[in-house]
Image: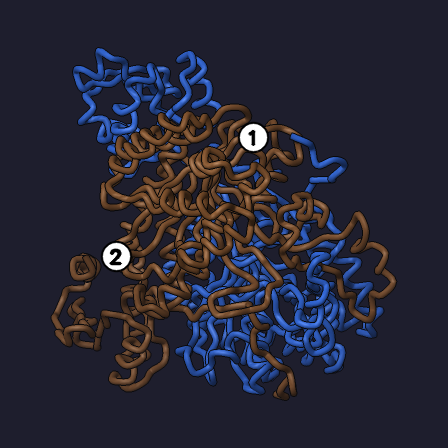
Chain colours: A blue, B brown
Amino acid sequence: MTKADKVNFSTPSGFPEFLPGEKRLEVYLLDTIRRVFESYGFTPIETPAVERLEVLQAKGNQGDNIIYGISPILPPNRQAEKDKAGETGSEARALKFDQTVPLAAYIARHLNELTFPFARYQMDVVFRGERAKDGRFRQFRQCDIDVVARRELSLLYDAQMPAIISEIFTSVNIGDFLIRINNRKILTGFFKSVGVEENKIKSCIGIIDTLEKVGEAKVKQDLEKEGVLAEQTQQIIEFIKINGTVDQVLDKLKYLAQTREAEELSIGVTELETVIAGVRNLGVAENRFCIDLAIARGLDYYTGTVYETTLVGHEALGSICSGGRYEELVGTFLGEKMPGVGISIGLTRLISRLLKAGILDTFAATPAQVMVVNMQDDLMPVYLNVSQQLRQAGINVITSFEQRPLGKQFQQAEKQGIQFCVIIGSEEAAAQKSSLKDLKTREQVEVPVENLALEIKRRLA
Amino acid sequence: MTKADKVNFSTPSGFPEFLPGEKRLEVYLLDTIRRVFESYGFTPIETPAVERLEVLQAKGNQGDNIIYGISPILPPNRQAEKDKAGETGSEARALKFDQTVPLAAYIARHLNELTFPFARYQMDVVFRGERAKDGRFRQFRQCDIDVVARRELSLLYDAQMPAIISEIFTSVNIGDFLIRINNRKILTGFFKSVGVEENKIKSCIGIIDTLEKVGEAKVKQDLEKEGVLAEQTQQIIEFIKINGTVDQVLDKLKYLAQTREAEELSIGVTELETVIAGVRNLGVAENRFCIDLAIARGLDYYTGTVYETTLVGHEALGSICSGGRYEELVGTFLGEKMPGVGISIGLTRLISRLLKAGILDTFAATPAQVMVVNMQDDLMPVYLNVSQQLRQAGINVITSFEQRPLGKQFQQAEKQGIQFCVIIGSEEAAAQKSSLKDLKTREQVEVPVENLALEIKRRLA
């Protein structure tokens, strides 16, 4: 066979690919996330990877992303079809770079077929033509939920988000985490109350958002560069550093809201209080959440509750799940105000970071729990039959078809992370028995074939 | 809010999108297919949607596909970065159009990290720039398994494929199906034995493959056009029409192989016999498979066993799962002979066809099985608490946050396919009781809150 010479078969830079044990970890995380999302009634959707370019570019605030356009490459014998494939002008198409714009398009496309509030999850891959860097990919999977209403959306939907985050990260067992909750109206209201000009507030929030990354001195400097007075800057810094228990922070905020008579601040504090009450009624453990007035979320479409989640002791990894409440995002194509609240887990990046930090470990290379080894080819009917019996009991089985030394077969099983080998020679076959070898403990026991499935399930449990 | 005027927000032609009830059906099918794949030890992988163009074009026989190239579209403020993004010449990248070429690249990329025989499944979406037609999409999901060896690959892997196909389609309950099995060596060997020239055999097999679609007369005509003599054509037609029980066909084939002294025919018949014996040892029901000598699979990389699966009574839908054995496909980038056998389910197309034919039905629009209705806002802490209790028992719950007339809330639940409503007023709350309403039977029963989860699970089972 001739080799496809000189072909560079490596993945293009920024397009990651998992080994089986890593992919199995991703599948497990996706299953867990999905289970939690569905337990709150979020329903799955998937939008195409490809949208019209005008759809992807409809929201001005996304203009900073590098989008991948697509265009058909015709084989030499089909050049005549060039005109059919439509690739320019109003026909230009491109790969989606997030799931928010496609959600807006989905809602517009199916408005009358959906029930509102519409609670959906989406776990698709998205594409960004950014320069590939450590932990930043050009193709990555995002697990998003959003609930969207046509007019009013209860703040209790905001309260459900921390409950969902908490349950996901408790289930996947990645150690202590902390959900930081804030409300953009509190920031905006406070800034107004200290006299920051209205048109500077958005950029001030953007600056606050960098606090953890760049430190207090730099934030001060940036605020002053933005034209915020030194005294105002001081008040802002003191404000966002307010800490204590959730109730202490709420008390301070309520006091501030009263004394300052700042309407937006008051509204924000009341919203936050309602959300916190809901979070508690949903049974989220007190050590899982806090109020952090420095959480702002850079994205300027958030208008109320915002969330970030950090791993305690691994804060440098950044937020592992973020989101918030918005008013004018998903109604874009309909010209309708559609309040929504959502969160997003950047799964590809998360897995890559957690593996690197040793917080998560890869799975075994195969889902098989058992290998039925091949002692002699003429017993193959027995091996196939036993394999099927185990599969019917819900056990994943590889039957070893190659006749090789037993030691090699054990090695083959162990290398893939298979825990059990079933050994049946001619005597055992005649007596309907088997030897079950546990490759972890090196223990080997004799088990009647009819009890094999039960015995393996008992040991796996 | 201003509408994003004149934006055409419809999906680009050929890029389908499911409603929630359809997507939930897809998720169910994916789960079922995955469970069966994993029960035979197939492990998941996913290759990037994007590969180097030279990789996708490395196999000449795929040159007929229209591939989508990708190129970065820079926002106006970042035009200076154009050089970084690499899009032409050796840097050209494109979307994968199948999962076979990427599998070959994956194996080349990770050769020393994989265990052989390497049994993997993959359920990614692929892209083809074909003209969008009924049931033919530009983006679609394929569920593929392949097992690949570095030297020899036992024919028992071929035997597992019908067992896997049988279990999948029995599980998803789509009615009677028939797995048609053949071996390309039998066709090639027979063609040689009647004197068809060696260089015409591939195209003859391609013609045979169209029998079901175009009928016998057209096949005859095409074979003769290809330069096959009338007498040879007659023998071929008679041959591929051989039918009967599996054993009858095998007997006829063995007799033919003996009398004709055609080596390749003999090898093919022996292979087919071994595969059939394995299929039987794996317990596949006799009415699920047959030998069909007219099954050829157009793709010219198949070298041995080939499969097609048809729905009995719906043969016009075409094959719902096909595949076969190949020798020189996945070793392309390594210049190594790597025998493999695989099958593929074109899931997007399958769902679209089965829904249209009424063979499958969509799922409910939400995974929620229960709605906890809102009788009065001040009981919300009770509703939230009850909702969490049910979720912890594995039940999917929507809590109704909006205070609306009870009838409206029932309607809202029913519209989404939710079966149960939990009703708790102040008296019930005080007594720790609830009313459970079954929207299917219209029955309503009183249940203590502590028994609610059990009662709902009993009724769901």
Q: Is residue B378 visible?
A: no
Relative side of A300 to A35, left or right:
right
Query: In this view of the protein, which residue sits in the foreground, B78 or A433?
Result: A433
Mark 1 falls on what kind of element? loop
Mark linked to residue A38: none
| Above or below: residue B396 compared with residue A371 | below
Quadrant hosting residue A11 = top right
Q: Residue at x 61, y 70 (%)?
A: A51
**Disc 2: CA contacts within 10 A as few (<14), some (14-19) or many (>=20):** few
Q: Secondary structure at mark 2?
A: loop
Amino acid on which the number 1 mark rests in the picture: Met
Q: Are marks 1 and 2 in contact (CB under 8 Å)?
A: no
What numbered label is drawn on residue B175?
2
Q: Nearer the viewer, residue B384 or B347?
A: B347
Mark 1–mark 2 distance (CA, rounded to whole Å):
36 Å
Tag 1 residue: B338
Q: Earlier in the sequence, mark 1 or mark 2?
A: 2
